[in-house]
């Protein structure tokens, strides 16, 4: 049975993945809620800065600390560790690759917001 630290680490990993998904696709929430960019744009800015500077999201060391506290050392069992961890922590990610991810994040969101703004201006929002 997983330890409390391991379960909390899994929760942090899921939150991390949700944050990444929100940073990438959260502009679409602006179709439903006009206030969504107030939450989304800071998330995008954070993601772009972390990627372009080669930084580390604070959720990563938090997760690792919780894993160590729970006595875990590796992602060798469980759905979350096996399937989701490689998405968030791809092996061999170089600083150039990380910068490209940051630029891709910015570009995807520029395109999504341009689409959202266009839909709002033409009144084709549903």
Image: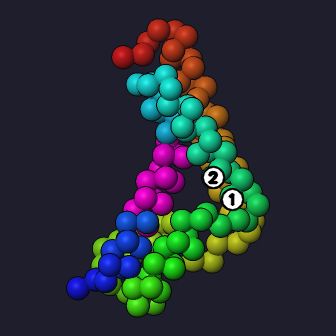
Q: Position of residue 111 (x, y in %)?
A: 61, 33
| Relative side of 43 to 36, left or right | right
Q: Position of residue 92 (x, y in %)?
A: 63, 77
**Location of mark 2 (residue):** 47
* Residue closer to the observer: 3 or 14: 3
Task: Specify the label residue 51 is tagged with.
Answer: 1
Query: Which span of residues is magenta-colored?
Result: 13-25
Q: Does the magenta stretch include residue 60?
A: no
* Residue closer to the observer: 44 or 109: 44
Instruction: Place residue 13 in its image quadrant.
Output: bottom left
Query: Where, quadrant-wise, is the C terminus in this rendering?
Result: top left
The structure residue drawn at horizontal position 48% and vertical position 60%, both measured from the top left corner, is 16
71 relative to 13, above or below: below
In the current view of this chain or complex, which residue is farthest to the left?
A: 1
User: What's the colour scheme?
Assistant: rainbow
Q: Is the magenta stretch mostly helix, strand or loop?
A: helix
Instruction: Estimate how packed mark 2 is, as few (under 14), some (14 to 19) or many (20 or more) residues with alpha carbons within 10 Å.
Output: many
The structure residue drawn at horizontal position 65% and vertical position 50%, both measured from the top left corner, is 46
Residue 83 visible (yes or no)? no
The structure residue drawn at horizontal position 51% and vertical position 14%, both measured from the top left corner, is 120
Instruction: Estimate how packed mark 1 is, as few (under 14), some (14 to 19) or many (20 or more) residues with alpha carbons within 10 Å.
Output: many
Q: How far apart, in angstroms, are the residues tagged by discs 1 and 2?
A: 6 Å
55 relative to 77, above or below: above
| CB-based contact (under 8 Å), mark 1 and mark 2 | yes
């Amino acid at each position: 049975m997983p330890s409390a630290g391991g379960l909390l680490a899994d929760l942090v990993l899921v939150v991390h993945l949700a944050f990444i998904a929100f940073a990438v696709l959260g502009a679409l929430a602006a179709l439903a809620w006009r206030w969504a960019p107030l939450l989304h744009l800071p998330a995008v800015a954070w993601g772009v800065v972390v990627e372009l500077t080669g930084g580390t999201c604070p959720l990563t060391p938090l997760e690792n600390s919780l894993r160590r506290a729970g006595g875990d050392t590796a992602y060798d069992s469980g759905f979350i560790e096996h399937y989701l961890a490689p998405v968030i922590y791809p092996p061999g990610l170089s600083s150039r690759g990380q910068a490209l991810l940051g630029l891709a994040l910015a570009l995807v969101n520029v395109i999504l917001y341009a689409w959202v703004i266009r839909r709002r201006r033409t009144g084709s929002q549903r």
